[in-house]
Image (spheres, rainbow, N blue to C red):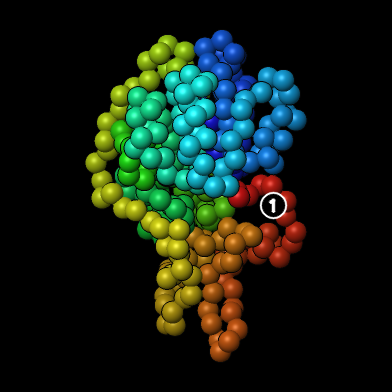
Amino acid sequence: MFLGSSRLSQVCLNTFLDSKEYGRAFEIVALVSNEDFASIAAKSFGSKLTPKLIDCESRNESAIEEAVKTLDVTLIFSAQHPWVLSKSLLHLVGGRAINLHNAQLPNYKGHNTIAHELMNGESWHEATLHWMAEGVDEGATVYQSRIGIEKHDTALTVYRKSLTIIPILVEQLIVAITKDKIPIGKIPNGRHEYYSKNSLDSIQEIPPDVGADYLERISRALFFPPFEPAFFRTGQKKVFVIPELEYETYFTSFDCENYPS
């Protein structure tokens, strides 16, 4: 069973479906997503992908549980699924549920993780496959892969680069599925930081008298079109702060399909 509906989810799904092991060692029998995502996948892979579609716009857990039972689901894979899976659902598959989290764990749980990496001055961005647990982005780590964060990287450029390492993790998982030997993994050490959906709200408005280093970091950390960047406020007006190298990107049209939903 595959859960996800974002650009990153699409990269994961494509990697599964492109595998020579698809249809032999494993098959996606249910897709928890939306009509648009399913339609794009169907156009790309046709009859190769004919799963039961379960809408993800609402939690819809009863439908997911029913599909697990009737379709003999033995593994759940999640990539930016918008809902937390319940303890009862995880129990139903014997704990065999894996999540793709596009950040290093346990230091960057939750949301807006790339922005926080840049604000914290990290040199590396990691993507993580981990067993799912009751808590958000908890559970033992199965595989990790990482890329360097360069001096002029923004949240957008790091995200784009991260899409190149996601297939590596999925391919490792496919090999493990084929051998029926997915690692037990281990709980990583760290500060276990969780960032909420609105974790950027308190830093988006730049306070007066900040230094050049802070301005440079926050301009890169919050640059992710089409979302609003960091800004100063002058009266009732906002003055947006854009990284110099991304000025043209922000003020010209771009293909929104390149950005996650």
- Residue in view at x 48 percent, y 75 percent: 205
**Is residue 164 shown left or right of residue 121?**
right
> Tag 1: residue type?
Cys
Mark yes or no: residue 148 visible.
no
**Residue 130 % position (x, y):** 38, 33
* Tally of numbered discs: 1
Question: Where in the figure is residue 242, as x and y percent of width and height?
Answer: 59, 67
Would you place residue 204 above or below residue 100 in this image? below
Which residue has dot 1 on it? 256
Residue 157 left/right relative to 176: right
* Residue ID at (45%, 58%): 197
Task: Name which quarter of the figure residue 137 lies in.
Answer: top left
> Horizontally, is 85 left or right of 28 in the view?
left
The vertical placement of 219 against 172, above or below, is below
Q: Nearer the viewer, residue 109 or 162?
A: 109
Residue 43 horizontal/vertical position (percent):
75, 30
Residue drawn where x is 58% and y is 87% of the image? 236
Residue 174 x, y percent position in the rendering: 49, 20
> Which residue is outermost to the bottom?
235
Q: Can the viewer see residue 52?
A: yes
Question: At 34% across and 30% down in the image, what residue appears?
Answer: 91
Camera-side residue: 170 or 63? 63
Please tell me whether mark 1 sits on a helix, a strand or a loop: helix
Question: Along the horizontal axis of the image, is 134 left or right of 13?
Answer: left
Local crowd at mark 1 within 10 Å, few (<14), some, or many (≥20)? few
**Quarter assignment of residue 254:** bottom right
Q: Nearer the viewer, residue 70 or 250?
A: 70
